């Protein structure tokens, strides 16, 4: 992608910019414990430990690796800024330039979500690379710096998570209503299913309780409601 932008700029006199962001977090992140990154995974684990009343929050590894995190709204702001202020060849790093240990990250998440929990580090799990932090001196020299520090960003993220829980199954009325007092678009059950995509599924499938294709390459998210009607 970086070289493609450089080639288009040189051949067609364009001004495409290639950004290299650090670890991102915020609303609409992936909170699946099997596939998510460290920050959303720890946030969900802390939330579920709080719901269970579990006094321990288990953290993978020793807690010593260092990572950098950027709130997603800051990335959006950086994108707009760079479109107006950056036309050089080559990519540009976008981040805070500030790293912290996984242990410090876990402590911050614990303090926001479940202050009563005790951190337990599972040394049988891998640590990964010792340190990941971007050099953002070029971005700072242009006049841009992040606005949302880590703890306020985590507080915003957890507030969104508490209202939405990223498509995880919730009991009836377990999700907060919107400003109009409505629960979801068609009911008040926050439940989603991932079906395989098929272009003609609605025209060729059964009207009531369609099974859909059994395999594919793309998934479709469908919302559910506690009220259903046969057609």
Image (cartoon, rainbow, N blue to C red):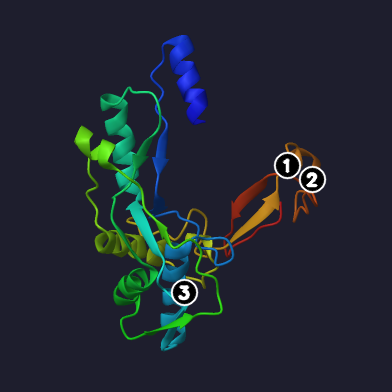
Rendered image: mark on residue 205:
2
Cβ atoms under marks 2 and 1 closer than 8 Å: yes
165 lies left or right of 85: right
Mark 2 vs mark 1, CA separation in Å: 6 Å
| Residue name at image x 49 percent, y 64 percent | 188
- Callout in the foreground (3, 2): 3
User: Looking at the picture, how far across and down is residue 153, in whole percent?
Assistant: 29, 58
For label 1, the crowd category at 10 Å Cα-Cα, with few meaning under 14, some 14 to 19 and many 20 or more, is: few
In the picture of the structure, the residue carrying the numbered disc 3 is 45
For label 2, the crowd category at 10 Å Cα-Cα, with few meaning under 14, some 14 to 19 and many 20 or more, is: some
91 and 28: which is toward the camera: 91
User: Looking at the picture, how far across and down is residue 83, in whole percent?
Assistant: 32, 27
Circle 3 SS class? helix
Upstream in the sequence, badge 3 or badge 2?
3
In the picture of the structure, the residue carrying the numbered disc 1 is 202
Circle 2 SS class? loop
Mark 3 vs mark 1, CA separation in Å: 38 Å
- Callout in the foreground (3, 1): 3
User: Looking at the picture, how far across and down is residue 110, in whole percent?
Assistant: 34, 76
The answer to whether residue 177 of the structure is visible from this angle is no
The answer to which quarter of the image holds residue 62 is bottom left
| Residue name at image x 22 percent, y 44 percent | 145
Q: Which residue, as the protein is rendered here, is positioned at the far top?
A: 12
Upstream in the sequence, badge 3 or badge 1?
3
Mark 3 vs mark 2, CA separation in Å: 39 Å
59 lies left or right of 134: right
């Amino acid at each position: 992608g970086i070289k493609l932008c450089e080639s288009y700029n040189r051949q067609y006199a364009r001004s495409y910019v290639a950004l290299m962001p650090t670890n991102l977090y915020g609303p609409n992140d992936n909170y699946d414990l099997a596939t998510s990154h460290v920050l959303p995974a720890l946030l969900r684990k802390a939330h579920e430990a709080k719901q269970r009343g579990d006094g321990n929050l288990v953290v993978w590894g020793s807690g010593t690796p260092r990572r950098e995190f950027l709130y997603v709204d800051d990335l959006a702001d950086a994108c707009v800024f760079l479109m107006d202020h950056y036309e050089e060849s080559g990519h540009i790093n976008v981040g805070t330039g500030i790293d912290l240990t996984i242990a410090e990250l876990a402590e911050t998440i614990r303090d926001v979500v479940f202050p009563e929990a005790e951190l337990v580090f599972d040394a049988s799990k891998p640590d990964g690379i010792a340190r990941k932090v971007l050099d953002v001196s070029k971005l700072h020299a242009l006049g841009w710096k992040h606005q949302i520090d880590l703890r306020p960003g985590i507080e915003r993220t957890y507030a969104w998570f508490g209202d939405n829980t990223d498509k995880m199954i919730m009991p009836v009325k377990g999700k907060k209503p919107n400003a109009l007092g409505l629960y979801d678009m068609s009911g008040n059950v926050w439940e989603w299913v991932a079906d395989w995509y098929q272009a003609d599924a609605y025209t060729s499938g059964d009207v009531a309780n369609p099974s859909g294709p059994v395999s594919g390459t793309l998934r479709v998210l469908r919302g559910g409601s506690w009220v259903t009607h046969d057609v």
